[in-house]
Amino acid sequence: MNGFEIDTLPRSNTYANMFSDEKMFEAFGKLNPTLTERTAYFAECWLEWRPNRYMLIRGKSDRELRKVLIDYGLQDFWDFQLKSGQIRFRTPDLAAISKLSIAKDYLKDV
């Protein structure tokens, strides 16, 4: 097999939905980066997005918040990351609109 055939191997629907071809090529230059490559990339995003962060209000479910944001059209990992009671957004605009409307019942300032 050549490299092109490997890059076009089928992926699970869950993987393909979370990691679209377009975004994967943009971020990694290929469809199937290694786990190490993905981890490093999204860890760097987490660090870069620090200014666009909020805390989850105590007692609110991160699972529910994730669903609200995804239902609104945001993409987990690419537009926001949620961990340990904190959420970080890719841009200040996404952070602001989420805080003011989409997820206002879930978020508080840091």
Image (cartoon, rainbow, N blue to C red):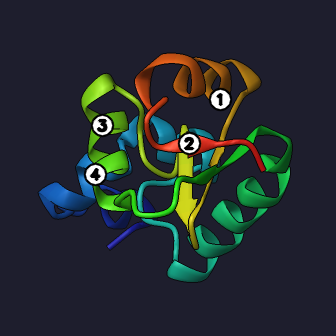
What residue does disc 2 label? 107
Snapshot quadrant of residue 3: bottom left
Q: Secondary structure at mark 4?
A: helix
Q: Nearer the viewer, mark 4 or mark 2?
A: 2
What residue does disc 3 label? 68
Disc 4 versus disc 3: distance between alpha carbons?
6 Å
Label 2 or label 1, whichever comes before in sequence order: 1
Q: Secondary structure at mark 1?
A: helix
**Residue located 61% across and 82% down the image:** 36
Is the Cβ of the residue at disc 3 closer than 8 Å to that at disc 1? no
What residue does disc 4 label? 64
Q: Position of residue 19 (x, y in %)?
A: 38, 50
Q: Secondary structure at mark 2?
A: strand
Disc 4 versus disc 2: distance between alpha carbons?
12 Å
Amino acid type at mark 2: Leu
What residue does disc 1 label? 95
- Residue at the bottom extreme? 36
Q: Is residue 57 left or right of residue 95?
A: left
**Residue located 66% across and 21% down the image:** 96
Q: Position of residue 52 (x, y in %)?
A: 76, 38
Amino acid type at mark 3: Val
**Residue located 82% across and 50% down the image:** 50
Snapshot quadrant of residue 86: bottom right
Q: Is residue 75 left or right of residue 26?
A: left
Is the Cβ of the residue at disc 4 closer than 8 Å to that at disc 2? no
Disc 3 versus disc 1: distance between alpha carbons?
14 Å
**Residue located 71% across and 28% down the image:** 91
Label 3 or label 1, whichever comes before in sequence order: 3
